[in-house]
Image (cartoon, grey):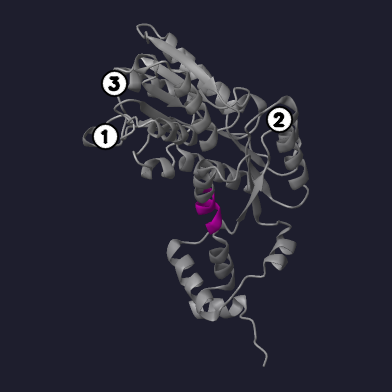
Amino acid sequence: MTSTRATLLQVAERAGVSLASTSRALHGTGASKEMVERVRAAAEELGYSPDAIGRSLRMKKTFQIAFAVADIGNPVYVEMLRAIHEVLDPHGYRVVVMSTGDTATSTGELVRSLSSGFVDGMIVVPLRTDDELVREIRQAPVPVVVIGRAMDDQGISSVSTDSAAGIGEAVRHVYSLGRRRIVFLNGPRETTPGAARQRGFDAAIAAEGFAAERVETETVNDFTVAAGLAAARRLLARASGPADRFDAVVAANDLLAIGAIRAVRELGLSVPEDVAVTGMDDTEIGQVFLPSLTSVSLGSAERGRAAARLMLGLADDPDQPSRQVAVGPTLMVRESTVPASGAGTGKGA
């Protein structure tokens, strides 16, 4: 028994619109929401599946956008990916997720290899940036958008955030709660986020009128739960007693913060009564963790959507000038710094 594949013409006839309108609706370009819904309903009813290979050959496009990150398991990148897909999917683009590794060299090699006809564009989130990576991005034959530091001086479209200012908000918040023995738990300082967040912490501590009794920085080799757990265990083991123990942890991301909370609770101590803990990135896992995590939101979803919109513009016109988008930080106060009765979302003190 043979089956006949539904054609685009049959979809157009079922939807009662022209062939051109049907094509635009299925590709998410130049069609109203009502028409898109009507055409897609007809396509689903007929079991129509677009010929992706034929479409690519006709238009000389792959309709694939690479999303390249250092760690595909990091919840920040997962949130970005959802937002990128949300923007690109209605326009007919698939998102291909790639792991770059954590060096600028490996990221540059990926940019060079993927831009040779495999994808129509790349959204890259580099942990480290050097001159060679910048050259690879500028020379890539397909558009590249960077989520990370602003790159307006390099002529590269980018979406940035001010994580240094965000760390400052976290420091001021725990200080306003009376915490004076503060530890900053940071990832590798040679990375873009590690360097920025260290600057923010140092600036907040040095601010006029801010005088903690004891401040220290503990730097670890990764932004993971395991690294945060091990570092907090070391810090707690070094304390000679309650008066020598830190009473606040400002962590460079949510994963480090969750590791620190685990270490604190292993000793029978309470969060936030004995130790207040803040994170950064405002991830879903931090929001549902017990206690829920006070965290600085850097607008992961918003940055993903902004990068995808920049990519769409470049896909239509690769020669357009580079554009930069900035997303500001917001402190979300929850139970890890304020007991449940006083916690809530929004900017803290």
Amino acid at the residue labelled 2: Val
Up-down: is 127 above or below 238?
below
Residue placed under numbered mark 3 in the picture: 177
Q: Nearer the viewer, residue 22 or 139?
A: 139
| Magenta part of the chain | 84-90
At horizontal 31% and vertical 33% (from top left) the residue drawn is: 346
Tell me if 144 is positioned left or right of 237 in this view.
Answer: right
Secondary structure at badge 1 equals: loop
Q: Where is residue 86 in the image (x, y as percent from the top left)?
A: 50, 53
Residue 8 placement: quadrant = bottom right
Per the model, the C-alpha gap separating discs 3 and 2 is 43 Å
Q: Quadrant of the C terminus?
A: top left
Which of the 4 quarters of the picture holds residue 205? top left
Q: Residue at x 76, y 36 (%)?
A: 139
Residue 134 - label: 2
Give the number of the mark in front: 1 or 2.
Answer: 1
Q: Which residue is drawn at 66% across and 56% down?
A: 63
Nearer-N-terminus badge (3/2): 2
Task: Quote the CA–CA distance across marks 3 and 1.
Answer: 13 Å
The secondary structure type at the circle numbered 3 is: loop
Q: Is residue 250 visible?
A: yes
Q: Give the amino acid at mark 3.
A: Leu
* In the image, residue 303 lies in the stretch drawn in magenta: no
Is the C-beta separation of discs 3 and 1 under 8 Å? no
Give the overall secondary structure of the magenta segment: helix
Select label 3 or label 2 by which is in front.
3
Q: In this view, does 204 lie above or below 344?
A: above
Q: Which residue of the protein is positioned furthest toward the bottom in this rendering? A: 1
What residue is disc 1 on?
343
